[in-house]
Image: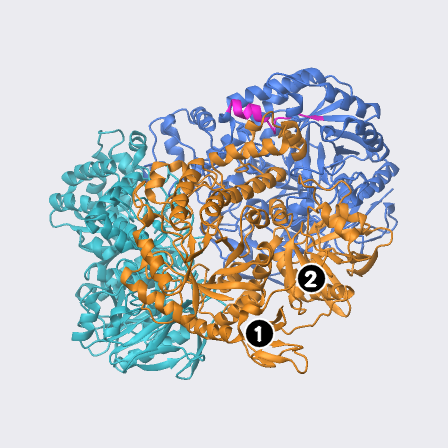
Chain colours: A cyan, B orange, C blue
Amino acid sequence: MQLGVCYYPEHWPAHQWESDARRMAELGIARVRIAEFAWSRMEPEPGRYEWAWLDDAIATLARHGLKIVLGTPTASPPKWLVDQHPEILPVMRDGTVMQFGSRRHYDISSPVYREHCARIVGEMVRRYGRHPAVVAWQTDNELGCHNTVPAYTQAALQRFRRWLADRYDTIGALNAAWGNVFWSMEYRHFDEIGLPQCTPTDLNPSHVLDFRRFQSDEVASFHALQAELIRAHAPGRDLLHNFMGFFTAFDHYAFARHGLDVAAWDSYPVPRTEVLPLGEADKHRWARTGHPDVSAFSHDLYRGIGNGRMWVMEQQAGPVNWAPWNPVPQPGVVRLWTWEAFAHGAELVSYFRWRQCPYAQEQMHSGLHAPDDTLSQGGREVAQVGEELRALGTARYATQHASVALLFDYEADWVVSAQPHGADFDYQHHVFEWYSALRSLGLDVDIVSAHADVAGYRLVVAPTLPILPDSVIAQIERGASHWIFGPRTGSKTSSFAITPELPPGKLQRVLPVRIAEVESLRPSIRPAIRFEGAEGHALRWRDRAQPGAGTDVLARFDDGVPALLRHGRVSLVTACFDEAMLRAIVAHCVRDAGIEAILLPEGLRLRTRGPLRFAINYSDEPHAVPAPHGARFVLGGPRVEPVGVAAWIEDD
Amino acid sequence: MQLGVCYYPEHWPAHQWESDARRMAELGIARVRIAEFAWSRMEPEPGRYEWAWLDDAIATLARHGLKIVLGTPTASPPKWLVDQHPEILPVMRDGTVMQFGSRRHYDISSPVYREHCARIVGEMVRRYGRHPAVVAWQTDNELGCHNTVPAYTQAALQRFRRWLADRYDTIGALNAAWGNVFWSMEYRHFDEIGLPQCTPTDLNPSHVLDFRRFQSDEVASFHALQAELIRAHAPGRDLLHNFMGFFTAFDHYAFARHGLDVAAWDSYPVPRTEVLPLGEADKHRWARTGHPDVSAFSHDLYRGIGNGRMWVMEQQAGPVNWAPWNPVPQPGVVRLWTWEAFAHGAELVSYFRWRQCPYAQEQMHSGLHAPDDTLSQGGREVAQVGEELRALGTARYATQHASVALLFDYEADWVVSAQPHGADFDYQHHVFEWYSALRSLGLDVDIVSAHADVAGYRLVVAPTLPILPDSVIAQIERGASHWIFGPRTGSKTSSFAITPELPPGKLQRVLPVRIAEVESLRPSIRPAIRFEGAEGHALRWRDRAQPGAGTDVLARFDDGVPALLRHGRVSLVTACFDEAMLRAIVAHCVRDAGIEAILLPEGLRLRTRGPLRFAINYSDEPHAVPAPHGARFVLGGPRVEPVGVAAWIEDD
Amino acid sequence: MQLGVCYYPEHWPAHQWESDARRMAELGIARVRIAEFAWSRMEPEPGRYEWAWLDDAIATLARHGLKIVLGTPTASPPKWLVDQHPEILPVMRDGTVMQFGSRRHYDISSPVYREHCARIVGEMVRRYGRHPAVVAWQTDNELGCHNTVPAYTQAALQRFRRWLADRYDTIGALNAAWGNVFWSMEYRHFDEIGLPQCTPTDLNPSHVLDFRRFQSDEVASFHALQAELIRAHAPGRDLLHNFMGFFTAFDHYAFARHGLDVAAWDSYPVPRTEVLPLGEADKHRWARTGHPDVSAFSHDLYRGIGNGRMWVMEQQAGPVNWAPWNPVPQPGVVRLWTWEAFAHGAELVSYFRWRQCPYAQEQMHSGLHAPDDTLSQGGREVAQVGEELRALGTARYATQHASVALLFDYEADWVVSAQPHGADFDYQHHVFEWYSALRSLGLDVDIVSAHADVAGYRLVVAPTLPILPDSVIAQIERGASHWIFGPRTGSKTSSFAITPELPPGKLQRVLPVRIAEVESLRPSIRPAIRFEGAEGHALRWRDRAQPGAGTDVLARFDDGVPALLRHGRVSLVTACFDEAMLRAIVAHCVRDAGIEAILLPEGLRLRTRGPLRFAINYSDEPHAVPAPHGARFVLGGPRVEPVGVAAWIEDD
């Protein structure tokens, strides 16, 4: 694994670049990402390009052996372009036109903007595509960020109508699929269809879901436009985009098929924990480290999206600026996050940013150096972890498949958000709770697409999967894996209707059960359940299941409603639960599948990479690691300190 | 009482209709409401009508002896009409134009839309007005729902100016009535007057109140347009509209004078309880049954609006889709609601809907059947209650006047919301608290207009009546009833100014008292009071009363402020109170009026219909019913189970 | 000190004026403010002026010896002017155009509106400028109220661009100052610059700060336009504006330099306490009196802004209408507020209003009389305090400088709100907490500009000062005062960048320390600290300080982070604290400066005016006053009752 850093030469006087490059190399940095917001410097006037400064910056970095990740600047079009073409500005769901003055002030559906993107990216790749120091290209920056996807422009509407015509062929087919006879929503032509916004009451969820699918495709094709130019002019270079954590505005699996060598993502564990829909107790508990599963979740997700290749493109290295509150992270946790990324298979951890920028929007976002150029606490930890990584020699450790696969599905998020039915049901949070339960049992988890081939996994977990792919049933029928499904599974057709057999839909073929009724639960309504000695509660949701022939009810609520059902290798969990009860239920299923589960203490997590076994301690107490007698420690020892990491080889 | 159901033949294949009709009849259904959202099927292209499907649907239902309630489809104009006339779209208070894609996307003030409504309704009534199976007509659907009234269109503005010119004749009269000299708000012509929206600070409440009155008249005249066509072409048929629970956007008493035979309303006790401004404890306590007074309140209100004729047009029969959380109702409560409706005088309880629709916006709204056509829990309860009703033979039981009348006034709601003075003062909630106190004392209550003749009542209760009609004073002076008035009574003139004598205004003629000051109270400020052995608190509001000659102060707060005053048969309650204290005060006044009050246990309610006395148990404990020795039980027995109903005849 | 009243003759029949004027004089009223919302009566049609009514009103008041404060009517342009020039309507940050129908419906940047203001004010001052009874002029009313500043109109944009061109001369200088290279925000011309609104993510805080500065200048120049006319035509009259409490939309120090003789302000202690960001416990505790430091803070602030001359132009005299809840104030507190104003140096306390207006927006705002013309509780207290003031003979008591100066800075508020970094960091609230700590120690405080000459003060307190003026450092270096600075001090340059030396910037010259990191803290994260026997917590914010040579760390948090540092006469407090801990730290610094601190009981406050020492008791318990043996009481005695006031002369 290499270390990297995000650097903005245009923010600093040119005479400082040499010193910066030298010290990067000294700190153990191998790769530097640059240029992704510098359009106004590349093309200060329409059609007048200035490359000399970028030539110099790249040359300076290269001189010190640094390799460049070059970003296209399309996330921040200059003012002159906006003034020439104000129609490229994005429009929010409430109709507000977003203005120039920050970033992402453009509509990815705009043909005019796409043309200008192709032009500036074309100029860049023709100039730097074969530069020996430029080893990778990043398109745009955090596509879809700041609620800019979905967007509600006239350009998007025109393309949406064509997308629908392609999908449905006839307007009759669309009317039938969407159920437009309801409330006289029938259309006579595709040109009658509008954007799903500003209606007196709920929109048709089929309309919303197709719009989400269309917008997801728009993001992918916007990327593809640049990806094709990069492929054409930058042969052999890694092509990537820097995704975000816990972000579902587009289908990342589909995106990856439009040209992607590496799934890079931006990791900010502390603010992410603050803004996720976690409980107050969790937000407080992990305010200075991030929740122990927040980074791991995205590592495991993006490793799958990148088909095994995952980078952390931006790694928090100190306090940031964008959460409601921005505490100083716990000393040591930057090192911990770095080791954790390695344990989860990262090829690169690139810190954000080299030096805190003293001006503009992100001036309160720290970096490896303070604005006065002294090394920050994060910078000192990077120096330490860099040496540790070199000492270990990380290159020889490959990542292998886990025994547990967790199915993640972007459409599931769109389905749930289009019609939550319960105000506090959040798809990502729901999946995260299940992931966290598995991780708290000491398990490695691969997060994979709901359409993935999961033949190699002993256990496959789908916390919920409203639209159940046929391939899942086929794999259950022909494979040997154990499967667990959560509530709402198989509840919808791909057109967003209730499945004709009732939920869990096609799953009934392998798990005979009928969900007769479902209910969302206000926070005060918490049906009680006892299971294997534990007492707990359902939260938010219950499916009321009627078991069919051969289906066992393994757990029931106190009021008799089934909570856990099983038929052969397939189990169904019918509700959301408090943390302890969910862990008890998942642990039962895990052991059923013949997998060993370790009840880890709070904040301790394990992870395997090749022969290396890691213990990562997010808590504020030391813990004994579950290493066998005779394990050889390559990092730390059998007692892992708070915010510490240990690694060992079990059979050496 | 008959049972009915809401049915959408256009949602299902025609071959299914026959089976549906047959099973309706078997289930004891007598009436079926259809067609109220089917414009796009009636007129798929401008001017091209298709009636064959509706002919067939009606014929099929009629063949099984079912009677039809036919709805006009004007709550969902088709897209082609919106595209022809985008000016018919409604505009919200913040200026947002609401778009096609759900329902109610039209402006009731639009002359163009009114013309198209008259056209489609005209076509319908000429075709079906004299059809022997079509026994009733419903105009539109839930007028004003989804905050579409008041509306802020240019068409509304034009009509508002004319309405004002009619009301005030001269602009000087309007300026004087509104007090426009304040802040230089004087107008020179009616055409200078704008919509009451988007001002830097508070609008003139007189402006707001007149706009609410105007909008209320608009709803009534929109209905009247259809009502006249129905009267002309559907002679002898019942004319109705399906009102909503706890909805005050227009004056239903005035509406009823524009053509109405039956006040039908849509009853959703569980979600209504979730969204009303009740306390969290109440929302939790009644999450699966609805609050014990929520349905009863609307039954008693609409029975009055319908001049004795009341239907439940849509009755919740299982979980719904539109509250923040949507739990499965308590088993048995659909039966309970049905009996309760009968006890309160309903002629019809019509369930929503025959079968859960698997697609579009309401796919998570249950019905008597699941989407797979199996009877739901609610459907099974309907089968039971249908048999029970037939066994009893309900037709012979008429509803009589209660001994207590509660005055309800839509203008009072507009006055309070135009200038709440305290952030948590809600008119409907305030009235509901008083109603609930009366009901918890075992009383039957008639809810009547503030302008009604109440000569026959022993006690008349006005929880608040800011604009006090002259007729109230006249009735006090000439009648023998006891009267109780709540806070804010007589505080405003009809032009929304403080009454010249100070509150309680004209009431001073019969109750000498002067409200020197009023105060709204933050939730933490709860003035203490002791009364008849109970300790309690004021909440939200206190009028500071100075009693005049002959007025007794029956209760004072600990700080000396009068809480309950009386002069002869007239009492004044000066504040809002916690539930127990309000009950104590109301009980005192009830007994004063010579009416027996029974302190019912939590969740138990009584109601009389003809000789029948009902006990309805919303609680989760069994209760002994207060039936006299020798009472003859026609339903249940002397112990009423949780979610149970008993009925007896006292002297048979 | 004189008493005054706000009066609206246009609201009442002319025959009532004589009686009103007579009774004002009888009540001890000396001055009457009139006319500030009467444009529609002064110019009912474009260009047609009507002055007769105002001539009469002034003559009637003057006949009874009353002096007039005449207000210009520009806060409420009439409808005909808005209809002639709809472009004068203001625009909110979200783009909403505010409409006619309340007040402040105009854009201060509009050249058309400025022209009409000059016209109507010109007419007024030419007619009344030399009238012997008209002794003072108020411009407009509460400029900036109702979020009308900043405003987002095209007129504002045009003027903003010119303002920027004046400030920066070249666009390159602006780009450099704002750091526009960040995110390609560079401009090529001043005409490319937009309003800071509606961007996908955060605006550049430099853009926001300059817009706030510009808007502040707009308010001042809008006032100046009228002030020049008044100066020209009303020689020798006091020129004033009625400012608001806790209002920072413009720099009042800069405003005062555009023509101001007296800083008048509008005092509403009870609703102000309800709407300030205080804790719930404080809001409850002081719900009927106002927080004990709320009025005092504004008195001390505006006394400084008025260069020693301060009036209360509107004094709450009973319940008001505009807070979420509006309780009746504690009896006696109107008298208390009046004495408190005197103690803090007021020349006039003018009550709002003579008589409660029974109609329009403020009908629920009380006055000295109820709408039925009977004296209110507040009116009775005014009668009492008027006699007390006359008995004392207040004219002979001058106000002297305090020993403690507190630095207040409007730019600091704009800096903090442009980039709060922590969601609950509010500049005014932060300063208020420090002010309250000083006042709870029995100290008199002068609130002065951060640019003021503070040579005469023993202690200078800057609760925070992000942009540290050079003059502060110069005064520290050459003076003998002790200084205390709070967190965030010296953190920003005047262009809104991090100071190159890192915070506290230039303060490092006199206090060697480097703020290496800062953190904002969620409410649950409260770092513990023990100091001088007390245990407490940081809240919201911590600067992580590294002390330099010669700097002592006087207090540390339990985790070792420095909390209080000192070098010579300069102390730095690095965090926000709970009330008790802040008081302990401030008390330490106060005693260090050689000033005696008295730990006052809750709700008791002291204040000195000339030889008079006041004790003001906001609490509901009596307190012994800290008067020395032999003190001569001129008001009350050594025990001050709840809501009472005592005053004594120590050495007579």
Q: Quadrant of residue B399?
A: bottom right
Q: Is residue C369 above or below residue A553?
A: above
Given this view, does label 1 or label 2 mark the residue nearer the observer? Answer: 2
In the image, A3: left or right of C305? left
* Residue C81 is covered by the magenta coloring: yes
- Residue identifier under label 2: B404
Q: Which stretch is magenta?
A: C70-85
Q: Is residue C545 above or below residue C94?
A: below
- Residue identifier under label 1: B617
Image x and y of residue A475, in percent = 18, 71
Element assignment for label 1: strand
Q: Residues within 10 Å of mark 2 (few under 14, many from 20)?
A: many
Image x and y of residue B328, in percent = 44, 69
Gap between marks 1 and 2, in whole Å?
A: 22 Å
Q: Which quadrant of the figure contains the N terminus of chain A?
A: bottom left
In the image, A512: left or right of B23? left
In the image, C597: left or right of A380? right
Mark 2 residue type = Val
* Residue plotted at (47% across, 70% down): B329
Q: Is residue C33 above or below residue C479?
A: above
Tell me, for residue A129, which label it has, or none: none
Image x and y of residue B156, in percent = 50, 36
Residue B432 visible at all? yes
Element assignment for label 2: strand
Q: Chain of mark 2?
A: B
Q: Chain of mark 1?
A: B
